[in-house]
């Protein structure tokens, strides 16, 4: 009996600490059929902010759940904003990456020189026209 109680307590702790965020049915119904990025973003934010405003400031557990959902959605919006096409729909990431690689290969010059195009230019700290004195905070490279 003691082992059974320990098992039940262990299972309850595991279920209560489940970190996956799920979409509630009400939001899923609102998102059903929407394909445009801006429509989805507006719907999600309005739904979550409305839920947050209906809660009392002292209801920290429910507010924490909604804030976690907002964080998850914000991350997804930030990532998928780059993959949005001209029609406002989100393309699969692999498709966008493969198209970019194909475009780069088409535009790459056939006979390219692998030597450095320009000489180094010192943009570092100079004191009394004496380069090299002081602190370098960063080194920047031009991509081309």
Image: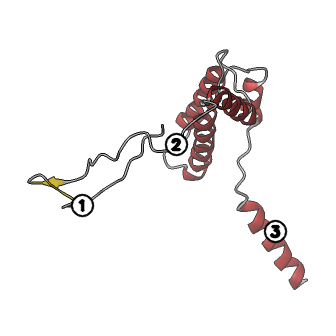
Residue 85 screen position, x and y as percent? 66, 21
Residue 129 screen position, x and y as percent? 11, 52
User: Which sits earlier in the primary sequence, circle 1 or circle 3?
Assistant: 3
Nearer the observer, disc 1 or disc 2? 1
Residue placed most toward the observer, 79 or 8: 79
User: Which sits earlier in the primary sequence, circle 1 or circle 2?
Assistant: 2
Q: Point out the image quarter for the N terminus.
A: bottom right
Nearer the observer, disc 1 or disc 3? 1
In the displayed image of the protein, which residue is found farthest to the top?
A: 87
Residue at (78% x, 66% y) in the render: 12
Residue placed most toward the observer, 37 or 58: 37
| Cα gap from disc 1 to disc 2, whole angstroms | 51 Å
Q: How is the image coloured?
A: secondary structure
17 horizontally vs 133: left or right: right
Residue placed most toward the observer, 56 or 33: 33
Residue 118 screen position, x and y as percent? 38, 40
| Cα gap from disc 2 to disc 3, whole angstroms | 30 Å
Which secondary structure lies at badge 3? helix
Q: Which residue is mark 3?
A: 11
Residue placed most toward the observer, 35 or 61: 35
Residue 25 screen position, x and y as percent? 77, 34
Q: Which residue is mark 1?
A: 135
User: Which sits earlier in the primary sequence, circle 2 or circle 3?
Assistant: 3
Q: Is residue 120 above or below residue 34?
A: below
| Cα gap from disc 1 to disc 3, whole angstroms | 56 Å
Within 10 Å of disc 2 (Cα), the crowding (few <14, some 14-19, many 20+) is few
Within 10 Å of disc 3 (Cα), the crowding (few <14, some 14-19, many 20+) is few
Residue at (64% x, 31% y) in the render: 110
Q: Which residue is mark 2?
A: 56
Q: Is residue 2 above or below residue 68?
A: below
Residue at (69% x, 35% y) in the render: 97
């Amino acid at each position: 009996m003691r082992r059974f109680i320990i098992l039940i307590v262990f299972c309850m702790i595991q279920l209560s600490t489940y970190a996956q965020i799920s979409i509630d049915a009400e939001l899923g119904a609102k998102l059903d059929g929407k394909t445009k990025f801006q429509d989805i973003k507006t719907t999600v934010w309005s739904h979550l902010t409305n839920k947050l405003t209906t809660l009392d400031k002292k209801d920290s557990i429910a507010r924490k759940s909604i804030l976690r959902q907002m964080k998850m959605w914000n991350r997804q919006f930030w990532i998928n904003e780059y993959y949005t096409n001209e029609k406002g729909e989100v393309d699969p990431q692999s498709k966008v990456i493969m198209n970019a690689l194909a475009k780069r290969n088409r535009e790459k010059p056939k006979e390219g020189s692998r030597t450095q195009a320009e000489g180094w230019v010192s943009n570092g700290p100079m004191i009394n026209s004496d380069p090299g004195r002081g602190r370098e905070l960063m080194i920047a490279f031009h991509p081309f």
